Amino acid sequence: MHLILFGSPGVGKGTQAKILSSKLGIPHISTGDILRTAVKEQTALGIKALKIMSSGELVSDEIMIGIIREALTDQKCSNGFILDGFPRTLAQATAFDELLRELNIMGKIFLVSLMTNEEELILRLTNRRACSKCQEIFNYHEIKDKDVCPNCGAINSFYHRSDDKEEVIRNRFKIFQSATFPLLEHYEKMGKVISVDGFQPVEKVTEDILNYLAMKSGKKIAISA
Ligand code: AMP
């Protein structure tokens, strides 16, 4: 299975990608996580990306396309992948389509579009906290009295991502609408889009995605857990 998870910031792409990755046994490739790791490790890429990410702007297409080419040509992606956060511009989508043709998997790709309501998402994002060790996302109300990350056991590791502040979020939405949203039409024209209501409970979103994928691909989907 080769999937792109698509939708506004905060719609739950990361959450669904992690669940689907474990159910389908294919890797979750999050370009945001790759960049955040580079920032944490203070690599040349991280130093360059930090300022751009903190303002909610997009890292250059050239850098992102290079990151994705390296990730998808890795052996661990040979049976499929779940992309979260890429492609985000038409230039990225065009380069990505070329890569898919080169890897002979253009026929296998689907884009799962998670649909939402902007104001609700802003509330969800401003309440979002991440663990600096495992990158797991929590709602502030879930962890406000906790010192230990329920996912990895790290102590005092919760932080508010600088790109989850309200002003930055509004900028990320603006960029999503102008640069990223047009990709939906690009993949709709190719008959690759599956649309799911992203406001349902997490388990229902996963169930809908798996059902639509089975319908669209005409295949029974093997689920490991
Ligand atoms: P995310 O975790 O996917 O919301 O990504 C966090 C930030 O990383 C974004 O706001 C961008 O600054 C940067 N980023 C992640 N993926 C991309 C991409 N495909 N193109 C450009 N910038 C990206």
Image (cartoon, rainbow, N blue to C red):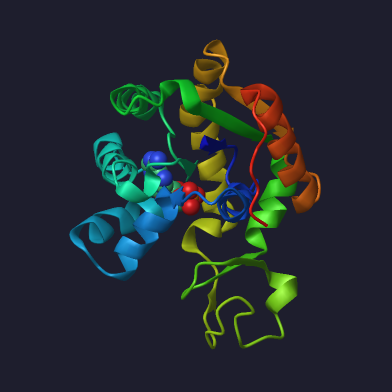
Who's the residue at 65% across and 67% down the image?
A: 138
User: From this viewpoint, is residue 136 visible?
Assistant: yes
Asked whether residue 57 is in view, the answer is no
The picture places residue 216, in percent across and down from the top left corner, at 66, 23
In the picture, measured across the screen, residue 63 lies left or right of residue 40, that is left
Relative height, residue 199 to residue 48 (above, below): above
The residue lying toward the viewer, choosing from 25 and 160, is 25
Relative depth, front residue between 189 and 127: 189
In the image, taking residue 39 as reference, residue 134 lies left or right, namely right
Count of numbered circles on the image: 0
From this view, report whether residue 149 is shown above or below residue 167: below
Quadrant in the rendering for residue 49: bottom left
Residue pushed farthest left? Answer: 44
Residue 63 spot, x, y in % from top left: 25, 42
User: Residue lying farthest top?
Assistant: 189
Q: Percent position (x, y) of residue 180? A: 49, 30
Residue beneath the point at 76% across and 38% down: 208
Give x and y (percent) for residue 200: 81, 45
Q: Nearer the viewer, residue 196 or 20?
A: 20
Say which residue appears at 54% left-offset and 51% top-offset.
25
Q: Quadrant of residue 38?
A: bottom left
Image quadrant in which you'd find residue 140:
bottom right
Q: Quadrant of the C terminus?
A: bottom right
Q: Residue at x 39, y 53 (%)?
A: 53
Does 19 sit left or right of 155 as displayed?
A: right
